[in-house]
Image (cartoon, rainbow, N blue to C red):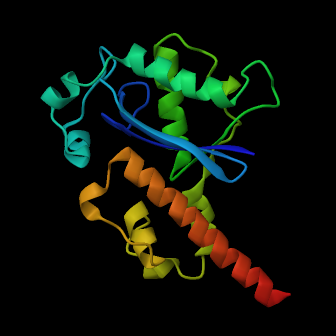
C-alpha cells in the first residue's frame, strides 16, 4: 500500500485565489517510510496573499519572494511521485493522507493545474483520507472535552507531545498527523480486542 502523508501552508484559504508556499510529505510504502520532503515555494504569480495567513505561518512578503520558483518545486515533486507511482497504471496510486486532507488535496491540485499540469489524479486515489474525521469519529463520546479540534489540541488531548514553536511548519504538522493516526489506530485496536 502506497501512502503519501502531506501537509501544506498557503497564502490564504481559497485554492483558486491563494497559493501554496510550503509543501511537506512523508512517503510510506507497505508501512515503511521511504523518504520525506519539505519545500518552500514562491507564491504563483497573481496569487492573493492574506496578512492573516502570513501571521499563522510566521512569514513576510519579503520571505516569500526569496523562496524557489514554483516550476522548480513542481518538478521536484513530480520526480518523487514518479519514483513510487506509475501514472500510466490506473491501479497504482498513492493514498493522500492529512489532517483536514481535503483542504490540502484541493490546494495542491489547484497549484498543479495553475502550472498547466492536469494529471494530478494519475498519482492519487480520490477521496483523500482525512485523519481529522477519523479522530472525530473515534472521539465522539469525548468531543466536549476539547475546546477546539485543531491538530495540536487533539494531539495534546491524546498524550502526544507538541512543540508549539514548530506548529504551522508543514513537515512538523504532517509528522504530528502521522503520530495522531498511529495513536488513534492503537486506541481503536485496543478497544476491539477488549470486545472480543
Residue lying at 24% horizontally and 35% vertically, measured from the top left: 50
Residue sitting farthest toward the top: 116
Total count of labels: 0
The answer to which of 157 and 78 lies nearer the viewer is 78
| Residue at x 75% of width, y 45% of height | 1
Q: Is residue 17 above or below residue 71?
A: below
Q: Determine if residue 150 is in view.
A: no
Q: From the viewer's perspective, is 43 left or right of 134?
A: left
Q: Position of residue 99 (x, y in %)?
A: 51, 53
Q: Percent position (x, y) of residue 145?
A: 44, 82
Residue 40 in the image, given as x and y percentages of width and height = 33, 32
Residue 138 is situated, as x and y percent measured from the top left of the image, at: 63, 73
In which quarter of the view is residue 52 placed?
Answer: top left
Q: Residue at x 45, y 78 (%)?
A: 159
> Residue at the spot x=25%, y=29% of the render?
49
From the viewer's perspective, is residue 3 above or below residue 145?
Answer: above
- The answer to whether 59 appears left or right of 143 in the picture is left
The quarter of the picture where residue 68 lies is top left
Closest to the observer: 115 or 142?
A: 115
Amino acid at each position: 500500500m502506497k501512502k503519501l502523508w502531506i501537509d501544506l501552508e498557503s497564502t490564504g484559504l481559497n485554492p483558486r485565489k491563494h497559493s501554496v508556499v510550503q509543501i511537506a510529505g512523508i512517503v510510506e510504502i507497505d508501512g515503511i517510510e521511504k523518504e520525506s520532503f519539505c519545500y518552500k515555494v514562491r507564491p504563483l504569480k497573481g496569487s492573493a496573499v492574506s496578512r492573516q495567513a502570513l501571521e499563522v505561518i510566521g512569514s513576510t512578503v519579503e520571505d516569500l519572494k526569496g523562496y524557489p520558483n514554483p516550476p522548480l518545486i513542481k518538478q521536484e515533486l513530480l520526480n518523487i511521485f514518479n519514483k513510487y507511482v506509475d501514472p500510466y497504471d490506473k491501479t497504482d496510486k498513492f493514498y493522500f493522507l492529512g489532517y483536514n486532507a481535503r483542504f490540502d488535496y484541493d490546494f495542491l491540485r489547484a497549484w498543479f493545474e495553475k502550472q498547466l499540469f492536469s494529471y494530478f489524479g494519475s498519482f492519487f486515489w480520490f477521496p483523500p483520507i482525512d485523519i481529522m474525521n477519523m479522530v472525530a469519529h473515534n472521539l465522539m463520546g469525548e468531543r466536549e472535552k476539547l475546546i477546539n479540534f485543531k491538530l495540536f489540541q487533539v494531539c495534546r488531548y491524546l498524550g502526544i507531545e507538541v512543540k508549539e514553536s514548530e506548529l504551522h511548519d508543514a513537515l512538523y504538522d504532517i509528522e504530528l498527523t502521522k503520530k495522531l493516526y498511529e495513536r488513534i489506530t492503537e486506541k481503536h485496536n485496543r478497544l476491539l480486542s477488549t470486545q472480543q
